[in-house]
């Protein structure tokens, strides 16, 4: 089984070089350069990369369960298959996030058909309608997360993006779209295509009016951490809105600082690194997640 300690020669799942990664995460080490922060591993084969990414997908579900993002059979995270970019991995329908292991993940094709090679389990129809269209429209994104988190769905009723009021919100500066309609439960790929269109060519996240939110990334790690971060931002936004009033006017961060901080603190490398403590926690608590 491939683990996070693999280090070989093929491009890592984050689509960058180690030197680029180190530049983007801004860590301090020793004078000789021997003390370095962990970085995405590289692999000699696509099969090894696939196994590693599936491990992180399974762990992401465990993390979502600990964050309270589970609700019945709602919620799904998808991962583009490294061996065939038209296929993706996703969670089985009616399995609790806290129980998902690598062997439970389902591989589906562009028609929503369950394929050999993964668990032979049914998947959520709306999940396919949404995720298939995002993967089709955005080849630069390899993972997408959607769950019915409390603060995400509460904030979605305003059909607007969060405001740039505090540092953590700047991860989403000019990087958060809004889908300004509600068409009921997503049952068709046409609705999924409209959501993908709302996401646009550059944004990683989108607020779905009266529904919730979706976050995406080059890696599952990036997409999952952005979901955690956006849900907390929605919470903070509503608290700020409730507290605002005469003498307590909101102060917004200006454009120059917002742009700089987004580049420094919201880049894909930083988001990958931010997810690793969550990954470590769930794997240490139950190593069987990797089976």
Image: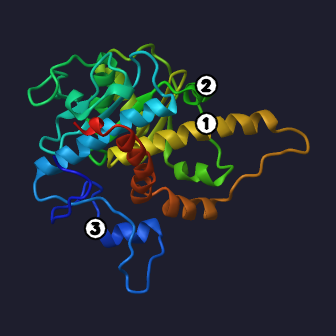
Left or right: 29 as drawn, with respect to 133: right
**Tag 1 near tag 2, CB within 8 Å:** yes
Q: Quadrant of residue 288?
A: top left
The answer to whether residue 56 is seen in the rendering is yes
Q: Where's residue 8, x and y in %? A: 16, 64
Q: CA distance from mark 3 to mark 2?
A: 39 Å
Q: Which mark is residue 179?
A: none
Label 1 neighbourhood size at 10 Å, few (<14), some (14-19), many (20+)? Answer: many
- Residue with the mark numbered 1: 234
Left or right: 273 as drawn, with respect to 257: left
Q: Which mark is residue 154?
A: 2
Residue 28 drawn above or below residue 209: below
Left or right: 142 as drawn, with respect to 179: left
> Residue at point 21% right, 34% down?
88
Residue 236 drawn above or below residue 40: above
Q: Where's residue 233, x and y in %? A: 60, 41
Q: Where's residue 131, x and y in %? A: 31, 30
Q: Secondary structure at mark 3?
A: loop
Q: Earlier in the sequence, mark 1 or mark 2?
A: 2
Left or right: 90 as drawn, with respect to 199: left
Q: Secondary structure at mark 2?
A: helix
Q: CA distance from mark 1 to mark 2?
A: 8 Å
Q: Which mark is residue 17?
A: 3
> Residue at point 35% right, 42% down?
283
Q: Earlier in the sequence, mark 3 or mark 2?
A: 3
Q: Where's residue 85, x and y in %? A: 17, 41
Seen from the viewer's position, the closer of residues 5 and 244 is: 5
């Amino acid at each position: 089984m491939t683990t996070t300690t693999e280090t070989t020669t093929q491009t890592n799942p984050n689509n960058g070089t180690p030197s680029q990664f180190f530049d983007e995460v801004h860590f301090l080490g020793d004078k000789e350069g021997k003390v370095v922060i962990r970085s995405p591993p590289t692999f000699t084969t696509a099969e090894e990369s696939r196994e590693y990414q599936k491990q992180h997908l399974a762990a992401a579900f465990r993390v979502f369960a600990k964050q309270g993002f589970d609700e019945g059979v709602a919620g799904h995270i998808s991962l583009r298959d490294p061996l065939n970019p038209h296929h993706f991995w996703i969670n089985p329908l009616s399995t609790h996030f806290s129980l998902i292991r690598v062997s439970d993940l389902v591989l589906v094709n562009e028609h929503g058909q369950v394929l050999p090679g993964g668990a032979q389990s049914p998947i959520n129809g709306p999940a396919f309608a949404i995720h298939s269209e995002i993967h089709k429209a955005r080849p630069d994104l390899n993972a997408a997360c959607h769950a019915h988190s409390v603060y995400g769905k509460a904030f979605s009723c305003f059909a607007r993006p969060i405001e740039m009021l505090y540092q953590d919100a700047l991860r989403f500066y000019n990087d958060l779209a809004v889908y300004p309609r509600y068409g009921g439960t997503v049952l068709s790929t046409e609705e999924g295509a409209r959501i993908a269109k709302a996401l646009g060519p550059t944004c990683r996240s989108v607020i779905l009016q009266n529904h919730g939110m979706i976050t995406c990334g080059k890696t599952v790690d990036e997409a999952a951490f952005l979901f955690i971060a956006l849900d907390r931002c929605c919470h903070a936004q509503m608290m700020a809105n409730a507290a605002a009033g005469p003498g307590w006017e909101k102060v917004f961060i200006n454009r120059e600082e917002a742009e700089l901080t987004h580049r420094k603190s919201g880049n894909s490398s930083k988001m990958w690194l931010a997810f690793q403590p969550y990954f470590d926690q769930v794997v240490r608590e139950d190593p069987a997640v990797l089976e």
